[in-house]
Amino acid sequence: MTDSSATVRPDRRAELAAGLARVRARIADACADAGRDPADVTMIAVTKTYPAGDALALAGLGVTDLGENRDQEAAGKAAEVAAAGVRPRWHFIGQLQRNKARSVVRYADVVHSVDSVRLARALGNAAAERERPLDALVQVSIDGDPARGGALPDSADEATGLEAVAAAVADAPALRLAGLMAVAPLGWQPERAFARLAEVAEAFRTLHPGATSLSAGMSGDLEIAIRYGATHVRVGSALLGMRPTLR
């Protein structure tokens, strides 16, 4: 591509390579401490606010999974990357409005943030046009605060209860219930948050044995998340550096 936004300077590529080496070493060490195989943990490079050139450079360095959290940015970036002939696995990890579902299913391979029955149904309807089912993770509210998003464990709420949301995903032919996602709540120590998530995930898998993905942990707490069973860690600043300011 000739667009400068989809190119990267050699020094930037070196920065990304160094960051990637550090993060991969952290993941390997965390897996060794937890007695886990590093191959069982997928690193998602969160490229939000970074240009398509960084995404292409990471793909060239062997990164297969990229994450975005705003459709307005992600749709264009995914199109630029595809136009360059690169096909990473795109993860949509941010809060998702139902009116964006049709756009997101055009490029995303996985949506991590399904937190209501209405959103599950909107995604299922939108994904009906896809050739393959869309992997969907149900976002869990660890602290039970609905204002922060996430389905509610141990709740019979027909709109946002964890089992109701999971059932809506499982019942949609165009979706595949892949597992759970969570973010450590503000004010919670990661140890407490991910221990609680592990309890929820264990109970969830008894009902949905095929839903084994557990998306948890970011740059600052990925080791703790891995200790408690994370299969996907979402890494941004530790890999790409401090984020540019959003405009």
Image (cartoon, grey):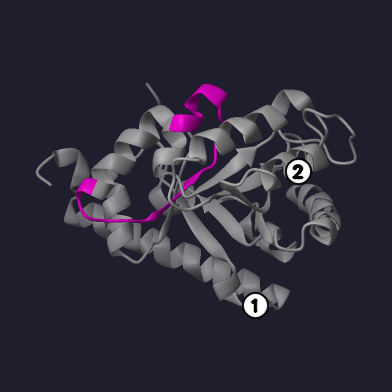
Q: Amino acid at mark 1?
A: Ala
Nearer to us in this view, 175 or 221: 175
The C terminus sits in image quarter: top left
Instruction: Write the residue at 32% across / 50% down.
Output: 55
Of mark 1 and mark 2, the one earlier in the sequence is: 1
| Residue in the image at 69% along x and 57% along y | 225
Residue 182 appears in the figure: no
* Vertical placement of residue 194 versus 186, above or below: below
Q: Residue at x 20, y 39 (%)?
A: 5
Tell me the element at label 2.
helix
**Which residue is at 83% across, 51% downward?**
200
Which stretch is magenta?
A: 83-102
Q: Which residue is mark 1?
A: 32
Instruction: Answer few, some or many: residues within 10 Å of disc 2's Cα (few below 14, many 20 plus, some between 14 and 19).
Output: some
Instruction: Give residue 159's position: percent from left, percent from top.
Output: 78, 27
- Which dot, 1 or 2, sits closer to the camera? 2
Mark 1 Cα shell of 10 Å, populated few (<14), some (14-19), many (≥20): few
Q: Which residue is mark 2?
A: 167
- Identify whether 198 is placed above or below 113: below
Instruction: Determine contact: label 1, label 2, CB under 8 Å.
Output: no
Any part of residue 213 in sight: yes
Classify mark 1: helix, strand or loop. helix
Q: Position of residue 13 (x, y in %)?
A: 25, 57
Picture quarter containing residue 139? Answer: top right
Badge 2 amino acid: Ala
In the rendered image, residue 66, in percent from the top left (x then y), is placed at 42, 51
Q: Is residue 135 left or right of residue 152?
A: left
